[in-house]
């Protein structure tokens, strides 16, 4: 959709603000309610799928029944031609994914607060009978005030009703899939709880619990593998939070929190430093192994050199003290320990490098040019690597761009004669944070944005709080990351809206009617001019300001009024005049006058 396009006669497209695999999101202004909204539009490739469109509408309408501060509100669902769209609350902020990318692991207090807000929103949705099914950082928005809002209820529901299969799992979502989703089993509210557990895990450790080279491999880990305890990755994670995360991520739904409310209660306990009950499990507990029996006829204490209670130690017969021999034995023991430590160090060093001469750690080629790739392969460790394009052919010397994808991934243990496939592409654009120019003068705001590397577009808007001529806000919002050289719109205050009014349409009205209409709009009828026109005599044919223009109240609007068409010499006189066929009519400007 192009900027300026008006949807349904009331939503004016301002700019594209987001793009996903299934939909495109635009910032728009509702011309009726004078507020900003987000319009989510299905991508063109889904517009002919009637079954998908039907489910999309049903699910979006269901999500429209949700009213909660931690859920993005849906205002309307509609279509224009073959374009299906959802009108949603516009949230100024960033996604949780962007926030985590910038911040890494979050402090426990902040992570718990975020998780509690998500659970609160899900609690409301689950009570309404709606399961999200696609909780992930991309679907959580954070406002400038730190309020989290869950989005994509409608699309998540529609997609998960059959368009995603285990043969083509989306990598963006599969990291947060529940085991039952990975298996294609029955899904209920506890599916969302598992995803929140994964998300909370990532918030406090800075990484996701399961990684893999394909969606299938990640999905299988959700089914079979146990996550590393978060506190082993980040030691500052409290035991109580460990417990909450691991309980939410239990493989069996019966061992998981049974509702978002239960998880929310435990999160509140963590936030106040209270203890949380251990993770429940229905698995049988293996009994402890007893110490082995003493086959020498003695006791364990005897075999370890301990002296039984009430007994004095007895010196072995036939042995005498030998301090020199003891010294030699001690020195020999120390020497052996040193040799052992050196040997272990060498072994560990070999293991760290992938197991010695046969294995290495795959180097990192991402972001490297052709010359930089070749420089890496000159290292003796990597000379045997077979570097090829993703097509399987050798890389030509004139390859442009940088490496945007590699297989295997950097850091993976590989044979030192492995084939490395590289994909070259354009270097990613530099991402810059949009500066906060709110309340600056228009000129200063333009300078600040241009100095940061952005193009600037100016829009006028009303504001009760921001003085006329100063910046109300920007789009994208301050603090968000945007490509260097991209356009930023600044909305400049025109003052309070009641200082201005819109010019009404006056065409076809009489002078008396126009005066009345203008008065109702807080405007004044200015000069009038009679002009020749085929329009009805005495009606307005033109006005000095176009209908819809924004002007200050009290402004004068000049009009032109039809005095009828000019009368040509060969035309008969009008019926109400004397019949003088032999005398030509005289009109203003006629040379014969």
Image (cartoon, rainbow, N blue to C red):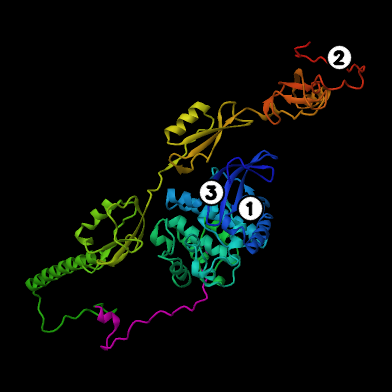
Residue 283's label in the rendered image is none
Q: Earlier in the sequence, mark 2 or mark 3?
A: 3
Q: Residue furthest front?
A: 582
Residue occupied by mark 2: 583
Label 1's element? strand
Q: Is residue 284 magenta?
A: yes
Residue 109 in view in this figure: no
Marks 2 and 3 sit apart, C-alpha to C-alpha, by 75 Å
Residue occupied by mark 3: 18
Q: Residues within 10 Å of mark 2 (few under 14, many from 20)?
A: few
Residue 452's quadrant in the figure? top left
Instruction: Where is residue 422? Give x, y as percent.
Output: 34, 59
Horizontally, is 335 left or right of 97 in the view? left
Of 459 and 473, the residue lying toward us: 459
Q: Is residue 500 above or below residue 529?
A: below
Residue occupied by mark 1: 83
Marks 2 and 1 sit apart, C-alpha to C-alpha, by 66 Å
Q: Nearer the viewer, mark 2 or mark 3?
A: 2
Instruction: Where is residue 254? Give x, y as percent.
Output: 57, 72
Give the residues drawn in magenta, as a range.
276-304
Q: Nearer the viewer, mark 2 or mark 1?
A: 2
Residue 346 in view in this figure: yes
Of 228 and 215, the residue lying toward us: 215
State whether the magenta stretch is mostly helix, strand or loop.
loop
Label 2's element? loop
Label 3's element? strand
Q: Is residue 299 magenta?
A: yes
Instruction: Where is residue 435? Give x, y as percent.
Output: 47, 36
Q: Residues within 10 Å of mark 3 (few under 14, many from 20)?
A: few
């Amino acid at each position: 959709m192009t900027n300026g396009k008006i949807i349904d006669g009331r939503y004016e497209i301002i700019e594209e603000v987001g793009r996903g695999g299934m939909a495109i999101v635009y910032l728009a202004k509702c011309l009726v309610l004078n507020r900003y909204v987000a319009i989510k539009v299905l991508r063109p490739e889904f517009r002919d799928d009637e079954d998908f469109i039907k489910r999309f509408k049903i699910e979006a309408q269901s999500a429209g029944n949700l009213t909660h501060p931690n859920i993005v509100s849906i205002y309307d669902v509609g279509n224009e031609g073959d374009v299906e769209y959802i009108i949603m609350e516009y949230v100024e902020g960033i996604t949780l994914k962007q926030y985590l990318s910038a911040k890494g692991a979050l402090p426990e207090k902040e992570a718990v607060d975020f998780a509690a807000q998500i659970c609160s929103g899900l609690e409301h949705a689950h009570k309404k009978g709606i399961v999200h099914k696609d909780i992930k950082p991309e679907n959580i928005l954070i406002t400038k005030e730190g309020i989290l809002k869950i989005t994509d209820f409608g699309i998540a529901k529609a997609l998960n009703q059959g368009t995603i299969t285990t043969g083509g799992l989306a990598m963006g979502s599969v990291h947060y899939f529940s085991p039952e989703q990975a298996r294609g089993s029955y899904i209920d509210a506890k599916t969302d709880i598992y995803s929140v557990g994964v998300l909370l895990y990532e918030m406090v450790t800075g990484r996701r619990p399961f990684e893999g080279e394909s969606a299938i491999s990640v999905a299988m880990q959700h089914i079979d593998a146990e996550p590393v305890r978060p506190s082993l990755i980040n030691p500052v994670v409290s035991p109580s939070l460990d417990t909450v995360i691991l309980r939410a991520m239990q493989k069996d739904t019966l061992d998981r929190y049974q509702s978002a409310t239960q998880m929310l209660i435990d999160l509140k306990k963590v936030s106040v430093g209270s203890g949380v009950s251990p993770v429940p499990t229905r698995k049988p507990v293996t009994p402890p192994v007893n110490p082995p029996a003493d086959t020498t006829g003695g006791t364990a204490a005897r075999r370890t050199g301990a002296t039984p209670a009430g007994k004095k130690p007895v010196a072995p017969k036939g042995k005498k003290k030998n301090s020199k021999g003891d010294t030699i034995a001690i020195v020999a023991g120390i020497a052996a320990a040193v040799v052992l430590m050196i040997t272990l160090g060498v072994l560990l060093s070999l293991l760290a490098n992938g197991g010695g001469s046969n294995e290495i750690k795959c180097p990192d080629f991402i972001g490297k040019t052709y010359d930089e790739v070749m420089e890496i392969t000159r290292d003796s460790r990597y000379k045997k690597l077979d570097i090829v394009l993703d097509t399987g052919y050798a890389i030509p010397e004139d390859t442009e761009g940088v490496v945007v994808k590699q297989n295997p991934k950097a850091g993976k243990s590989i044979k030192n004669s492995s084939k490395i496939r590289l994909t070259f592409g354009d270097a990613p654009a530099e991402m810059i944070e949009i500066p906060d120019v709110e309340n600056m003068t228009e000129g200063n705001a333009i300078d600040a944005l241009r100095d940061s590397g952005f193009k600037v577009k100016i829009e006028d808007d009303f504001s009760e709080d921001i003085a006329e001529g100063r910046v109300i806000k920007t789009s994208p919002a301050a603090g968000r990351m945007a490509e260097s050289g991209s356009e930023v719109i600044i909305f400049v205050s025109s003052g309070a809206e009641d200082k201005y009014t819109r010019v009404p349409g006056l065409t076809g009205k009489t002078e008396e009617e126009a005066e009345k209409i203008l008065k109702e709009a807080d405007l004044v009828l200015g000069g009038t001019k009679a002009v020749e026109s085929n329009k009805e005599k005495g009606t307005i044919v033109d006005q000095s300001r176009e209908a819809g223009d924004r002007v200050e109240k009290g402004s004068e609007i000049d009009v032109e009024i039809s005095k009828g068409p000019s009368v040509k010499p060969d035309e008969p006189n009008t019926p109400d005049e004397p019949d003088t066929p032999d005398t030509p009519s005289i009109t203003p400007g006629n040379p014969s006058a």
